[in-house]
Amino acid sequence: MKIALASLALLFIAPAQAPVGEAVPTPATAPAAAPALPPAPQGPRVTLATKAGTITIELARDKAPLTVANFLKYVDQKRYDGTSFYRALNFTAPAPIGLIQGGVRGRSDKVLPGITHEPTTKTGLSHTDGAVSMARGAPGTAAGDFFIIIGDLNTLDANDKDPGYAVFGKVVDGMDVVRTILAAPVSATEGTGAMKGQMISAPIVITTAKRAR
């Protein structure tokens, strides 16, 4: 999409010279600058150490508290350690666009019960570049699998006809690692249904997931 930018012209006018014998008015004192606002509070951060590098995620606990609490439970209980990024959906485009998916992949020793769905219509979040969102079947089944967006895929947001997926954070460091995983070779035969051909041939192991703050 092309965005037109209007040019801004700044016009400087020299003050008129005061007649001889008249006092030159003193310029008004500029008002004191307003004090700077404190920085917006930041959510907790989690680092995912993978075989391809480290990804740091900032969690939107103020906007998606249930989803963030669930994700942190998996992190704190070490349930992501030893799992992997196993899916790469890579669309053909001039620039990389798609998603990578990772997590417990239904492992009985790792998975916890599903959580209440927090749609983007309520959280105000969106599936933009770097967004982290929960994988799910029906709403309310999201558990321990998540995906990271590359590019903009706001078609995954909720709308009047579709509950969409629950965004709960964003990547703040390591998008180069995310793009490396997106480019990983995939199997032409693995996967079922719409996911066939999207399974990474050699899944990228998540060695550790831990809080960064």
Image (spheres, rainbow, N blue to C red):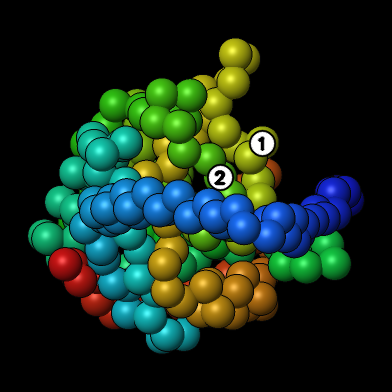
Q: Residue at x 66, y 36 (%)?
A: 155
- Badge 2, how many Cα within 10 Å: few under 14, some, many 20+? many
Badge 2 amino acid:
His
Badge 1 amino acid:
Thr
Choose between 7 and 143: the one closer to the eye: 7
Q: Secondary structure at mark 2?
A: loop
Taking the view exactly as shown, the residue that stands out farthest to the front is 21
- Residue 56 appears left or right of 185: left
**Residue at the disc numbered 2:** 127
**Residue at the disc numbered 1:** 155
Locate the C terminus by quadrant: bottom left
Question: First in sequence: mark 2 or mark 1?
Answer: 2
- Residue 161 appears left or right of 56: right
User: Can residue 121 be seen here?
Assistant: yes
Distance, label 2 to label 1, CA atoms, is 8 Å
Tell me whether the residue at label 2 lies in contact with that at label 1, contact meaning CB atoms closer than 8 angstroms: yes
- Badge 1, how many Cα within 10 Å: few under 14, some, many 20+? few
Residue 138 image position (x, y, % from top left): 45, 26
Compared with 195, 117 (above or below) is above
- Residue 115 appears left or right of 149: left
Q: Secondary structure at mark 1?
A: helix
